[in-house]
Image: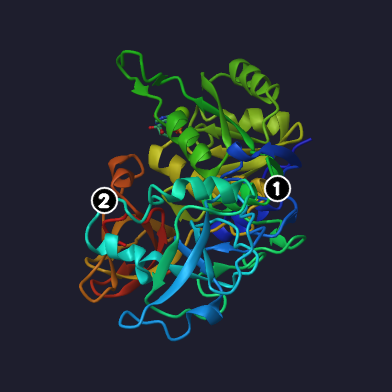
């Protein structure tokens, strides 16, 4: 039932093997308000042209462009105003030669008109320039009746005349029907990550719900006789369980749903029972913390080996050497090391891409940039060393990096201030100040970029 392998492998080898066990989760109908952060599992088409009708891009007058030719401030051209139309209404009147309809942004272009001239280029703009409050946003008193007239489809009355101070070309300040989106057009393809911008477009094309890949459920079980929960007093020999909470936050940040299973003690019976309880919650990924090393009480290995098909690896990375991966009753299980930094960095390198793949994401890796080291960085480990670092930009716009200090696998504060991890290859024993090194960007802080 089990295949145990205690091999020494690279990060890339471990990741490729782990990812081969995951696929995008089945699509499900998703309410639009919950769709952001998820990935489209269908091609989305529009049920209408957007905009659905030709409309005004400005507050002004709908005119016939030919009537406006040659108009200047010195030689204004008068037009008869036959009505008003606001967004949400349809002008009932047709604009004939020598006529204009007062029009607001978003209102349908009236029949007969082929352009819009802005208030600022008409006598109505004089009031704006004179500083009259809101003069451009409201119809003059007398125009209110005309607004209703036109909106209701009647012949216009009220405002009588406007002077044009400039000419316009046909279709100036007019938004054409379908200029953004054509009816039937695929506006968002399957595989697209839904951000706020995509949410807005989905609403515009009439999709109250869309098919997206289900969010992965990730069970998290910490193990260790020394652990107490965050709200408990810390007795002799005890430490707080920080891994469960950090891992849960990583799951959420990647788009998954964490299932916190608490702490299991280091004995076979309890651990076996807690794993079974976790599996009963139907996770898509099971994550354990600690107990996969070579100490006396590292029994997670034994339980996993008995319960499923497991590989135990020495991954050539630092922090994080011991790693278990396998399948327990059909569920992929990632056995992380216990040291806080090792645990979180291993989750970052192996758990996060697995979650992204289940979400349907096509790109699983963080952005990597080349940076200049501001200090010497030794790597005597013979493993790929992930130096927790702060990447900044200098006056020339070049990326520079400084480590966050002490880099031990128990130094949680080496991660808290970091926005990047520098990758020092296993064969590279020293990065000299001024040399370049690749940086995995964990975050792009606004004050830097
Ligand atoms: P282990 O992998 O069980 O040998 O644990 C390695 C180190 O990680 C030990 O110092 C543990 O006390 C510590 N550790 C294990 N589990 C956790 C946890 N959930 N939170 C914080 N530290 C832990
Ligand atoms: Mg332990």
Measuring from the top left, give residue 148's x and y in whole percent.
Answer: 54, 45
In the displayed structure, 223 sits above or below 246; it is: above
Q: Is residue 23 above or below residue 392?
A: above
Left or right: where 370 falls relative to 244: left
2 or 1: mark nearer the eye: 2
Residue closer to the observer: 371 or 309 = 371
Where in the figure is residue 324, as x and y percent of width and height? 59, 41
Q: Is residue 267 left or right of residue 425?
A: right
Q: Residue at x 43, y 86 (%)?
A: 70
**Percent x, y for residue 169?**
52, 81
- Residue depicted at 40% across the width and 18% down the height: 229
Label of residue 330 in the image:
none
**Looking at the image, can residue 425 be seen?**
no
188 on left or right of 404: right
Q: Which residue is mark 1?
A: 22
Relative to 195, residue 232 above or below: above
Q: Earlier in the sequence, mark 2 or mark 1?
A: 1
Q: Is residue 347 above or below residue 377?
A: above
Please give left or right for residue 70 compared with residue 25 in the image: left
**SS at circle 2:** loop
- In the image shown, does 407 or 242 lie closer to the viewer? 242
- The residue identified by callout 2 is 133
Q: Quadrant of residue 231?
A: top left
User: Image quadrant of ligand 1?
Assistant: top left
In what element is the residue under mark 1? loop
């Amino acid at each position: 039932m089990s295949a145990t392998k205690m091999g020494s492998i690279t990060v890339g080898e471990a990741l490729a093997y782990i990812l081969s066990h995951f696929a995008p989760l089945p699509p499900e109908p998703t309410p639009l308000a919950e769709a952001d952060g998820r990935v489209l599992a269908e091609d989305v088409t529009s049920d209408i042209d957007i905009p659905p009708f030709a409309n005004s891009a400005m507050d002004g007058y709908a005119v016939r462009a030919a009537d406006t030719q040659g108009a200047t401030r010195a030689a204004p051209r008068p037009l008869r105003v036959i009505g008003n139309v606001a967004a949400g209404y349809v002008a009932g009147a047709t604009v004939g030669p020598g006529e204009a309809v007062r029009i607001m942004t978003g209102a349908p272009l009236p029949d007969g008109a082929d352009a819009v001239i802005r208030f600022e280029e008409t006598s109505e703009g004089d009031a704006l320039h004179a500083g009259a409050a809101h003069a451009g946003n409201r119809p003059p008193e007398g125009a209110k009746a005309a607004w209703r007239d036109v909106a209701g489809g009647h012949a216009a009355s009220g405002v009588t005349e406007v002077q044009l101070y400039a000419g316009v070309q046909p279709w100036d300040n007019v938004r054409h029907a379908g200029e953004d989106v054509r009816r039937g057009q695929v506006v968002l393809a399957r595989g697209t990550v839904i951000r706020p911008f995509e949410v807005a477009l989905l609403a515009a094309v009439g999709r109250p719900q869309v098919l997206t890949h289900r969010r992965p459920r990730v069970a998290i079980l910490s193990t260790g006789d020394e652990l107490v929960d965050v709200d408990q007093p810390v007795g002799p020999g005890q430490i707080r369980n920080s891994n469960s909470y950090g891992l849960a936050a990583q799951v959420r940040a990647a788009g998954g749903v964490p299932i916190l299973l608490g702490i299991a003690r280091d004995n076979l019976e309890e651990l076996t029972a807690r794993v079974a309880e976790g599996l009963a919650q139907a996770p898509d990924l099971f994550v354990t913390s600690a107990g996969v090393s070579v100490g006396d009480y590292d029994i997670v290995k034994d339980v996993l080996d008995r319960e499923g098909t497991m590989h135990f690896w020495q991954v050539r990375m630092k922090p994080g050497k011991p790693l278990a991966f396998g399948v327990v009753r059909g569920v992929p299980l990632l056995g992380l090391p216990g040291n806080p930094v090792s645990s979180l960095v291993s989750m970052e390198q192996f758990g996060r891409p697995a979650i992204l793949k289940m979400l349907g994401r096509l790109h699983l890796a963080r952005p990597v940039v080349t940076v200049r080291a501001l200090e010497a960085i030794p790597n005597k480990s013979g493993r790929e060393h992930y130096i927790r670092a702060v990447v900044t930009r200098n006056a020339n716009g070049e990326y520079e990096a400084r480590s966050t200090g002490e880099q031990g696998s128990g130094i949680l504060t080496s991660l808290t201030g970091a926005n990047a991890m520098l990758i020092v290859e296993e064969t590279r024993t020293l990065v000299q100040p001024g040399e370049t090194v690749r940086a995995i960007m964990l975050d792009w802080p606004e004050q830097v970029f």
